[in-house]
Amino acid sequence: MSRVGNAAIKLPSGVSLSRSGEEIKIKGPKGELTSPLPTGIDLKEEDGSVSLSLGKEDADRHLRAMHGTVRALLANCVKGVSDGFVKNLELVGVGYRVSLKGKELTFSLGYSHDV
């Protein structure tokens, strides 16, 4: 049994979850995302958290493998609609410069021209 799939996902305030067939819709302050929910995986929402469980005891190998994957996809969707996604860039070294001009980054990386 998947340890990742058994972990509950906390829903922050302002995030709602709705299920329609084999699809889960997650709405939050940053937008709306959908995630697939394979047949055989049950979804329970209680006290501001969501948990996934295998519907039957004799679940096949593919369904057991998807248990943790579906939980991870759902957790990423919840994070995306509540906090958003951020990518940090770190330059390490001597002689590198980055400047912000409007919404563009200009890199000085040792070439004869800016990149």
Image: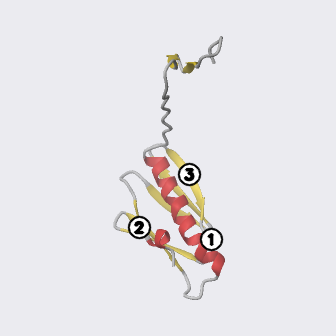
Tell me which label, 1 or 3, sits earlier in the chain. 3
Whether 9 is drawn above or below 60: the answer is above
Task: Tell whether 5 sits left or right of 35.
Answer: left
Q: How far apart are marks 2 and 1 (CA)?
A: 18 Å
> Residue drawn at (39%, 58%), measured in percent from left and top?
11
Q: In this view, does 16 lie above or below 58?
A: above
Q: Mark 2 points at which residue?
A: 8
Rounded to the nearest angstrom, the CA distance separating label 3 from label 2 is 19 Å
13 horizontally vs 36: left or right: left
Residue type (three-letter) at the residue carrying disc 1: Pro
- Say which of 40 and 72 sits in front: 72
Q: Where 106 sits versus 60, above or below?
A: above
Residue to which mark 3 is pinned: 33
Specify the farthest residue to the front: 94
Q: Nearer the viewer, mark 3 or mark 2?
A: 2
Q: In this image, 19 relative to 6: left or right?
A: right
Say which label, 2 or 1, has the lower sequence index: 2
Identify the amino acid type marked 2: Ala
Residue 73 drawn at (x, y percent): 55, 59
User: Disc 1 designates what residue?
Assistant: 38
Near-viewer residue (62 or 82): 62
Residue at horizontal 62%, vertical 71%? 38
Q: Residues within 10 Å of mark 3 (few under 14, many from 20)?
A: some
Q: Is mark 3 on a helix, strand or loop?
A: strand
* Horizontal side of residue 39 vs 31, given as left or right: right
Considering depth in this image, is 16 or 57 the residue closer to the camera? Answer: 57
Q: Nearer the viewer, mark 2 or mark 1?
A: 2
Q: Which residue sits furthest bottom?
A: 58
Give percent across and percent down for residue 4: 48, 68
The residue depicted at 64 percent of the width and 82 percent of the height is 60
Give the amino acid type for the residue marked by disc 3 in the picture.
Leu
